[in-house]
Image (cartoon, grey):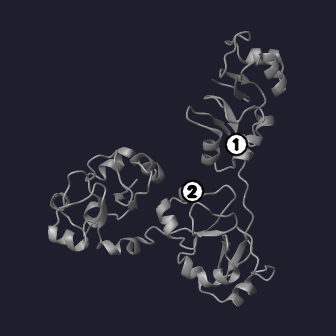
Amino acid sequence: MKCPGGLLYAVRRGETFSSIARKTGVTVSELKEANPDVDPDRLDVGQIICVPGIAKEFCPTSNLYTVRRTDSMFTIARSESVSLSRLIRANPQVPDPDVIYPGEQLCIPKPVKPPEPPKCPDGIFYAARRRETGRSIADKFGISLEDLRRANPDVDLSRLDVGQVLCIPGVLDKICPGRRLYTVRRTDSMFTIARRESVSLSRLIRANPQVPDPDVIYPGEQLCIPRDHDNYDDDYKDCEDGLYYAARRRETGRSIARKFEISESKLERANPGVDLRRLQFGQILCIPHVAKKLCPHRRLHRVRRGETMFTIAKEYSVSVDDLVAANNWIPDPALIFPGEDLCIPKK
């Protein structure tokens, strides 16, 4: 539907042309003129109409978003990198933010540029966790308590609040050799940061061992964004340039060795203490010396609990079909196991 200079609006329960006109500051005759094919006496809930001439007033940024069938305010806010509360405030015409309709338009506010973080020469900002003290944080980062105190002169290191941000001086090269830091904002999560910075969630977590719980990060602290190949060797050297695979039903060491075209003796040496004749369903095995052959660009993802081929494909912005094709050793793409590795195809 065309609506030059106006806004596409979805009719809510009990609304009429008269109430919509009052809400949006136009006249009933203007509404009728902009919607010649609409019967004002028979409006349906969710019906899209044009409210003419209000786009600039309602949306000074001129950044209008047309709602799709599977959208919610939350998913739109996340995809447009704005906070949910600011998106709601920018759309006062929507009476219930939990109810939006396909085809109507929302105003996307301008993203707020985060303030420049305070200076912390050659260091990073870190948020204190529960029961942490200045001494325990200094020990965690391998610096002296005195150095920590000098870098935070206005902070009582013996009484830290949860989430209080401290400068950890002189650790940047050790914590983040690539010196690519990201300052956490209020609505961020590890997942949204990974997506914004185009790295996998698992690699972002591995690049920030100073964060004890990846589900809990604090505004103002800094995370290290890994480079393309950071942590690969550390993650896979214990599997001899191989990958991890979960045994399927009725599989044995012999059938798995045959599947990956390696000898049973190599498989046995890579999995000491494992009885390859009596494997459990879902038991994780190291398949040595196959990573380069099966995944030449060495872009592997370690499956986490609750993940599916679909969610992993979405995380890496690849199609499910391409992901399935890149992992043709997985017998049933609908069944993958936490702890096994998948090859992420090139885009």
Q: Residue at x 29, y 74 (%)?
A: 240
Identify the secondary structure beneath mark 2: helix
Q: Which mark is residue 182?
A: none
Neighbour tally class for label 1: few under 14, some 14-19, many 20 plus, Cα within 10 Å = many
In the image, residue 217 above or below residue 61: below
Q: Earlier in the sequence, mark 1 or mark 2?
A: 1
Residue at 82%, 17% in the rendered image: 18
| x 74%, y 46%: residue | 86
**Horizontal relation, residue 244 to residue 149: left or right:** left
- Distance from the alpha carbon under mark 1 to that under mark 2: 18 Å
- In the displayed structure, 304 sits above or below 321; it is below
Location of residue 107 by image quarter: top right
Residue 109 in sight in this render = no
Name the residue located 60 percent from the left edge and 29 percent from the top edge: 102
Nearer to the camera, 4 or 29: 29
Image spot of residue 22 (x, y percent)? 84, 23
- Using the rendered view, name the quadrant where residue 237 is placed: bottom left
What percent of the width, then of the height, locates residue 191? 55, 56
Frontmost residue, 192 versus 148: 148
**Residue 342 pos. (x, y %):** 35, 57
The residue wearing badge 1 is 108
Task: Tell me the SS state at disc 1.
Answer: loop
Q: Is residue 22 in view?
A: yes
**Does 87 sit left or right of 215 as displayed?**
right
Q: Read off the residue under disc 2.
A: 196
Query: Is 238 rendered above or below residue 19?
Result: below
Q: Are marks 1 and 2 in contact (CB under 8 Å)?
A: no
Residue 98, position as x, y percentages in the image: 67, 35
Q: Amino acid at mark 2?
A: Arg
Amino acid identity at mark 1: Ile
